[in-house]
Amino acid sequence: MPESKKTFYVTTPIYYPSGDLHIGHTYTTVAADTLTRFKKQQGYDAYMLTGTDEHGQKIQKLAEKAGVTPKAYVDKTVAKIKDLWKLMNINYSQFIRTTDPEHVKSVQKIFKRFYEQGDIYKGTYEGWYCTPCESFWTETQLVDGKCPDCGRPVERAHEEAYFFKMSKYADRLLKYIEDHPGFIQPESRKNEMINNFIKPGLQDLCVSRTSFDWGIPVDFDPGHVVYVWIDALTNYITALGYLNDKPQLMDKYWPADLHLVGKDIIRFHTIYWPIMLMALDLPLPKTIYGHGWVLLKGGKMSKSVGNVVDPVELVKKYGVDPLRYHVLKEMKYGSDGVYNEDLLVANINSDLANDLGNLLSRTIAMTVKYFGGVIPAEQAAGEYDQDLKDTAREAIETYASYMDKLDFSRALQAIWQLIGRANKYIDETEPWILGKDESQKERLAAVLYNLTETLRIVSVLIAPAMPATAEKMQKILNVPDSVQTWESIQSFGHYPLGTQVEKCAPLYPRIDVKQYEKEQAEKKKAKKTQPKQKKQKQAEPKVPGVITIDDFAKVKMRVAKVLSCEKHPNADKLLVFQLDFGDEKRQIVSGIAKWYKPEELVGKKIIACTNLKPIQLRGVDSNGMILSAEKDGNLRVLTVDGDMPEGSEVG
Ligand code: MSP
C-alpha cells in the first residue's frame, strides 16, 4: 500500500458577514492560502478551511436595519465574501457557514453533551454585553465603562442563561500551555494569556442568550440560543464531520496544525476553545498563531471606525499579486503592519517591476537576441556562477525555514535576495560584451542558462505567495510541469537545455509615480473642498483616562480680555465676567469669588472654554468657562504669558 501523505490542516477565522471585508481580513486569508500552497508544494495533503460566522445579535440588528431576515442578509454578504476570495485567488478546501444544517446539528449535540456531563449549568446572567465583539463582561472588567477589547459602549444584560465552568479546566489548560511551547505563537501572546487571564482566575462563561433568537437553538430548552463564540469555534471540527453527516475528515486532519487568527481573538482561541476541546475529549490544535493588525496611519482598520481599505478597489487598480505581495511583506512576524498606498506603489515599482520584472525581461531579451530564444550550452562553474548557485541554495533554505515559522515577510526577503544576486550577476558577467565576441558564445550561453535557471527557481519559490505571477513566469520560460516542483529546486540545473522561451511584455509595468502623486494630490484637494462629511472616528484608546487627539480637539479654548467683573446678585461664591474675544463678547459666570475680588482680574487676559453648552447659574446666563488651577484650597486663574490678541486659539 502506498504510504499516506502527511497532512496539514490550517484554518482562518470564520468572518462576520456584517458588510464588506477589508484589507485586514484579506491579510489573514492570503496568509493561510500562501501557507497551504507552500505545504502542498512540499508534498503535504494540506487542507484549508475558511468560512463565515453568521449568528449573533450583531447580525440580527444589521438585518433588522436593512429590513430583511437575518438569513437573507447573510446570504447576500456571504456571496460577496466568496467573490472576494475568488478575486484574491484563495484556493480554500472548504468554506463553512455556521448556518449550514450539519454545523447546526453538531453544535446542538456538543452543547447537550456539555450540559449532560455537568460542564454547563443554568443560572442568571447579570452584567454587560458588547454586541460588536459578542463578548460578556463584568463590571470590573470594563474600562471607563466601555468594552475593554474595542472601547465601544456596552449594553446591560440580565437574563436566564447557561454557564460553562471554565475554572474546572484552568489548571489543565495552564499545564498544557506550559508543556507545549509551540501552542501559542508568538511567545508574547502566550505570556499575555497566562498572566492576564488564566492566572488571575477564569470566570464561568455565559454560553446562551435569550434576548434575541438569531442563533442555534438549545434544543432541550426553547428560548435559549447558543452563545455565538461557542457556535463559531466549533466550526473547526464540525467542518470535518464531527457529530454530523458530512464527509468524515476528523481522523485525517484533526488536531489542526494551525489556527491563524488576529490578536484580537486570540483569547477565545487559546482559552475557551482548548477548554471546549478538553471537555469533548479531543486533542488540542498544534499551534494558534495570533498575527498583528493591519494598521492605517497608526489606528486599527475597522468597519466601525470607518477607515477601511477596500481590497477590491486596490485589486482593480494594482492587480491581485501585488496586493498579496504587499500585505505579506509589510506584516512583520507577529507585529502590526501598516497599510499605505504609497508603500504599495513603491513595492510594485521597486521589488516587482525593477527587481523581478527586469531580471526576467533582460534575461529573455538577451536569450532571444543571442540564441533565438533557445539556450544550447551546458552550465558553467566560474566564480560568479558558483556564488549565484550558493545564493540560490541559501535562499531556498532560508525561505523554507521562515515559511515554517509563519514569517512571510522574511521568507519573501530571502527570495528577493536571490533576485538581487541574479541582477548583480548580469552586471558582473556583462553578457552584452560577451555577445560581441564569437569566441565567448559558449560562456554567454552558460550565463544565460544560469539566469534562466535562477528564474525557474524563483518562480517555484514565489508560487505560494503570488500564484498567478509564478504561472506567468513559467509560461514565458516554458518550464515543464515536472520541474515546477519543490524537489526540482533542491539542486541547481533542472531547467531543460534547449527549451524555447517566449518573448514577453514586462511582468509588472511600472507605476508612473508622477501621475500617481498628481492623482493623490487631486484626491486630497477634492476631499478638502467637499462639504465636510462625518469625520473619521479614531479608535478609542484602551488606557483608562487617556483621550484621543480628536477628543481633545473637541474642546475649544480661546484667549479673552476681562472687560468687567461684578458680584453675582444671588450667590456669594460666583462672579459675573464680561469678556472680549476680539470678534465677540461673552458673559461667563465663574465660582471664584472666594479667591478674587471683582476688580482684580479686569484688564487681564485669561483663557476660557468657548464651546460649553450655555447654562444659567442662579438665574444669570453663563456662556463658557474660565480656566483655573486649584490645589490645597488655593486657586489661580490661567492667564497668558506675553501679549496674545483676544480670540487667539489655545490648544
Ligand atoms: N467571527 C469572528 C471569528 C470567529 S473564529 C471562530 C471574527 N470575525 S471578524 O470578521 O471580525 O474578524 C476575522 C479576522 O479578521 C480576525 O482574525 C481579525 O483579527 C481579523 N482582522 C480584522 N481586522 C483586522 C485588521 N485591521 N488587521 C488584521 N486582521 C484583522 O472575529
Image: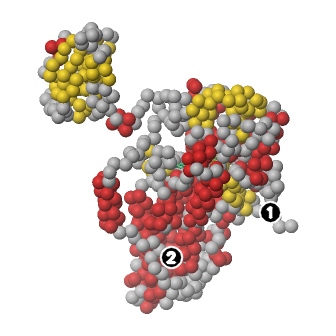
Graded by Cα atoms within 10 Å as few (under 14), some (14 to 19) or many (20 or more), the crowding at tag 2 reads: many
Three-letter residue code for mark 2: Leu
Give how far across and how far down residue 571 sits, in percent: 28, 10
Closer to us: mark 2 or mark 1? Answer: 1
Residue 46: in sight, yes or no? Answer: yes
Q: Which comes sooner in the sequence, label 2 or label 1?
A: 1
Of 436 and 299, the residue lying toward us? 299
Q: Is residue 620 above or below residue 524?
A: above
Give how far across and how far down residue 139 sits, in percent: 58, 25
Q: Is residue 28 above or below residue 299?
A: below
The C terminus: image quadrant: top left
State left or right for residue 529 relative to residue 119: left
Q: Residue at x 53, y 47 (%)?
A: 292
Of 506 and 514, the residue lying toward us? 514
Please tell me whether mark 1 sits on a helix, a strand or a loop: loop
Residue annotated with mark 1: 4
Q: What coloring was used for the rendering?
A: secondary structure
Q: Residue at x 76, y 29 (%)?
A: 122
Residue annotated with mark 2: 451
Q: Residue at x 24, y 13 (%)?
A: 568
State left or right for residue 636 relative to residue 361: left
State left or right for residue 107 relative to residue 183: right
Please tell me whether mark 2 sits on a helix, a strand or a loop: helix
Three-letter residue code for mark 1: Ser
Numbered circle sitting on residue 106: none
